[in-house]
């Protein structure tokens, strides 16, 4: 997690730190071809130079940004699971268990959907 050390060192809440470390390690282990990087003061992962997903710690939730296309694609499931979302961000409440299956499918969707993308953003 050396790529994210500067970001992680700023997180004071131990529970939040533990959760985001767990999520970031999980992404690295499940998608080893993705490149981890710190940009816009957020841990993110890219594939062939294109954005796939980013994370940010907030007081009440872990924000996950898969770009709007990923949110629109999973919108019904997000609503069914009562996961708050906006046009660019999902909010996973700290008090809830983390849905790694959903995260896997979101990342996989972005990788597949952006296979021929040659820009950072869609």
Image (spheres, rainbow, N blue to C red):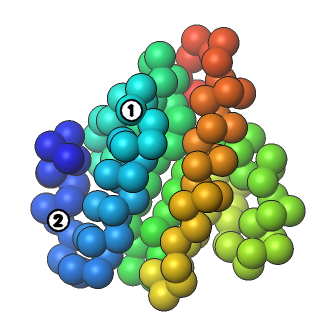
- The quarter of the displayed image where residue 46 is located: top left
Q: Quadrant of the C terminus?
A: top right
Q: Residue 117 at what x, y percent from top left? A: 63, 16
Can residue 47 be seen in this snapshot?
yes
Determine whether the residue tagged by mark 2 lies in a helix, strand or loop: loop
Determine whether the residue tagged by mark 1 lies in a helix, strand or loop: loop
Q: Residue 70 at what x, y percent from top left? A: 70, 45
**Number of on-image labels:** 2
Q: From the viewer's perspective, is 115 left or right of 60?
A: right
Identify residue for label 2.
10
Q: Residue 77 at what x, y percent from top left? A: 80, 64
Identify residue for label 1.
32
Q: Residue 66 at what x, y percent from top left? A: 59, 46
Please, which residue is most extreme toward the right here? 76
In the image, residue 106 sits, relative to residue 32, either above or below, namely: below
Q: Earlier in the sequence, mark 2 or mark 1?
A: 2
Which residue sits at x=29%, y=40%?
38
Which residue sits at x=73%, y=78%?
82
Which residue sits at x=29%, y=61%?
21
Q: From the viewer's perspective, is 71 left or right of 95?
A: right
Can residue 39 be seen in this snapshot?
no
Question: Mark 2 touching mark 1, by CB under 8 A?
Answer: no
In the image, residue 110 sits, relative to residue 86, either above or below, namely: above
Q: From the viewer's perspective, is 40 left or right of 90?
A: left
């Amino acid at each position: 997690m050396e790529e994210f050390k500067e970001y992680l060192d700023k997180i004071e809440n131990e529970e939040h730190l533990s959760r985001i470390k767990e999520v970031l390690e999980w992404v690295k282990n499940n998608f080893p071809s993705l490149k981890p990087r710190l940009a816009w003061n957020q841990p993110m992962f890219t594939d062939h130079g294109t954005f796939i997903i980013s994370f940010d710690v907030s007081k009440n939730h872990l924000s996950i940004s898969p770009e709007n296309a990923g949110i629109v694609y999973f919108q019904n499931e997000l609503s069914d699971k009562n996961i708050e979302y906006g046009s660019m961000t999902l909010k996973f409440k700290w008090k809830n268990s983390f849905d790694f299956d959903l995260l896997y499918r979101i990342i996989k969707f972005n990788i597949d959907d952006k296979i021929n993308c040659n820009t950072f953003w869609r």
